[in-house]
Image (tube, rainbow, N blue to C red):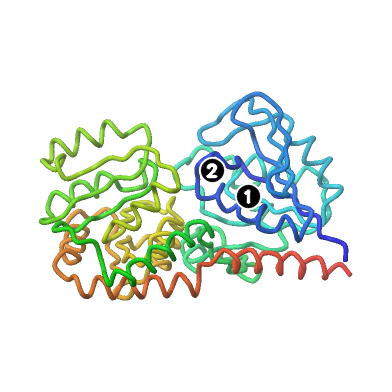
Amino acid sequence: MKKLRVLQVNKYYYPHIGGIERVVQQVAEGLADKTEMTVLVSAEDRNYHEEDVNGAKLIRLPRHIKFGSMPISFGLFGTLRKLSKQQDVIHLHMPFPIGDLACLLSGYKGKIVLWWHSDVVRQKKLLLLYKPVMKRMLKRADAIVVATRGHIDGSAYLKPYQEKCYFIPYGVDPSIEEKAEQYIAEQKTCQKTQNNQSLTRFLFVGRYAYYKGCDVLLEAFAKVNNAELIMAGSGGREEELKHKAKELGIAERTFFTGKMTEEELCRQYAECDVFVLPSTARSEAFGIVQIEAMAFGKPVINTMLPSGVPYVSIHNETGLTVEPGSVDKLAEAMQWMVEHKEERLQMGERARTRMKAEYQLEKMTTRTLELYKDLVKENK
């Protein structure tokens, strides 16, 4: 049987770090043996790159300009037009304004799948220019993929297109899930339920971006007793945050790891007691790091954002959910975790069960392939 020809379009591809880039990679390499998969992205330099990545064809176009977080490659329009003639499905990851425009101008008549990762939140001026293009693309799309109901309810744009929305939750990378399985097995063999440490260990993982709530986390942690905090991430604000920790008097029990390998990250997941996602803006649309921590049987403290975040780890079931931006509420939740060990461990067990049921990568790629096939069948 002839394989479907699929073209994914996004800003960047691995090793660029980002949740969307991870999903693009997972779909590309997870479906490379079941489709003819091509991925079109920008390079992070001015050179053209073409390579085979685990069975998927990857094309990186020269990046000529960077407008905010968006790369602009002058060759995108012509390349997409040329490649589109050979495709059964174009799968565009949003938000990517220049990608939307290139797709609309390509003349492509086949099926278009949009994976809506988040609204444009902060770039107000860009949104004024982008909104007409985005609305045309939403109308043109044959299917719109979202990871949770929160992506629709929290969006200013998706509700008129609900009939075209398909729910496909993200999945944990098999390599991370395998390490989590090893950790769980070792815990059972050693008859341990957690590390024999006197301090409760909280873990944050992510870039030190404006919406991640790092300042709120540090201020909340300053109110928590008998605990330590691991800040596993990197970014331009690292020195600023270290200075803040010193000012708050928590520098001796707050540890900044810098950029980590996957092996090092998994060790942090294994050694922590509680995972914290203190994000303050709906730019945080899901938080894949939540499901990675849940794979290790860790309870999560997240925030009640109008996005997919609180749909991932459930309040009072797999963790605690607090008001975004509230130092006091976050501090109360963290202190509760310190003082309620048994309940915390039970939440962690339920978190792992939820991850196994909802957030496995094979389920994500299978559902994505089924969507492609269903759309293409409509033309036959």
Q: Label 2 sits on what residue type? A: Leu
Residue 113, x across and y down, in percent? 69, 58
Please state if 233 lies on the left or on the right of 243 as rendered.
right
Residue 287 vertical placement versus 215 (above, below): below
* Residue lying at 71% horizontally and 69% vertically, measured from the top left: 370
Res 134 label: 1
Local packing at callout 1 (Cα closer than 10 Å; few below 14, some 14-19, many 20+) is many
Secondary structure at badge 1 equals: helix
The residue depicted at 50 percent of the width and 67 percent of the height is 359
Residue 134 rendering spot, x and y as whole percentages: 63, 49
Residue that sits furthest to the front in the current view? 189
Residue 239: x %, y % from top left: 27, 31
Q: In terms of depth relative to the viewer, which is nearer, 143 or 17?
A: 17
Quadrant housing the C terminus: bottom right
Kindly identify which residue carries mark 2: 127
Which residue is depicted at the point 65% across and 23% down? Answer: 46
Label drawn at residue 75: none
